[in-house]
Image (cartoon, rainbow, N blue to C red):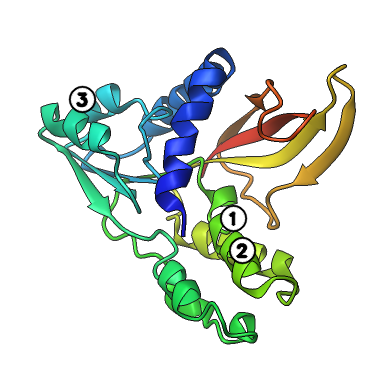
Amino acid sequence: MQYFQDQEGIVRRYMREKENWDNHFSNSKNFILKSAQTKSKNKAVVLGSGWLLDLPIDKLSEQFNEIILIDIIHPKQVVNRIKKYPNVKIQKADITNGLIDFFYKNKGDKEILNKIDFDKYLFPIPDADFVISLNIMCQLHIILIDFLRKHQEDTIKDLQKIEQQIQELHLKALPQGKSCLITDFEEEVFNEDNDLVGVNPLIRINLPLGNFKSTWQWKFDSSMTYRDDLKTYFNTVAIDF
């Protein structure tokens, strides 16, 4: 389902857009550390840890007794890197709690969207003092929907509803008073002259107001390789709640 290729693609794009991405990563790290200040310091859980580019793992490992990094794939480089932190562990898991397997096994079923019992796909996060949803909420549905489109062409309808339900599940899994949510919420597309030519919403649900929040623009692709002849920027929000 292209999860390996997607993760490798992140690193390649980062090398092309390093300066712009580093600013996004710095904003993410600073907000996480601010959010961590108000949390108990036994166990921290990171959803969507990826390459750790946007996670201040050094400082968090000093603050928390235990850190669990959760993702569907952990790059070998990350596995090797965290060996120097005795209190950091990795867990391989589908953050959608089984939707990936369900979509794969039922890819030919034209009624697949009507057969999903979303209540059973709530991801369990037990006994965590701090939960970080790390730039993952708006991405959870993308590969799933692209996979369905590939196998069912134009037969899949009402895809926005699937996006909304997956995002609702993810938000429901984050414990109140213990969570830090970082996600892109809007995509802006610019032409070569930096004229805004399109805006696309990335979040289909109401996000929590939170105790405090921060927003910034992530210049995701300024070299026009993600879209031909267009630059793609994301508006990002970070919320402590």
Q: Quadrant of residue 196?
A: top right
Which residue in the structure is indicated by mark 2? 145
Label annotation for residue 64: none
Say which of 206 and 222 sits in front: 222
Q: Residue at x 20, y 25 (%)?
A: 62
Of badges 3 and 1, the one in the foreground is: 1
Which residue is found at the position 37% from the left and 32% from the top? 36
Going by the numbered disc 1, the residue's amino acid type is Ile
Image coordinates for residue 94, horizontal then vertical, percent: 37, 60
Amino acid type, callout 2: Ile
Q: Nearer the viewer, residue 127 or 197?
A: 197
Marked residue nearer the N-terminal end (2 or 3):
3
- Which residue corresponds to mark 1? 142
Of marks 2 and 3, the one in the foreground: 2
Q: Secondary structure at mark 3?
A: helix
Q: Which residue is mark 3?
A: 62
Mark 1 is surrounded, within 10 Å at the Cα level, by few (under 14), some (14 to 19) or many (20 or more) other residues, namely few
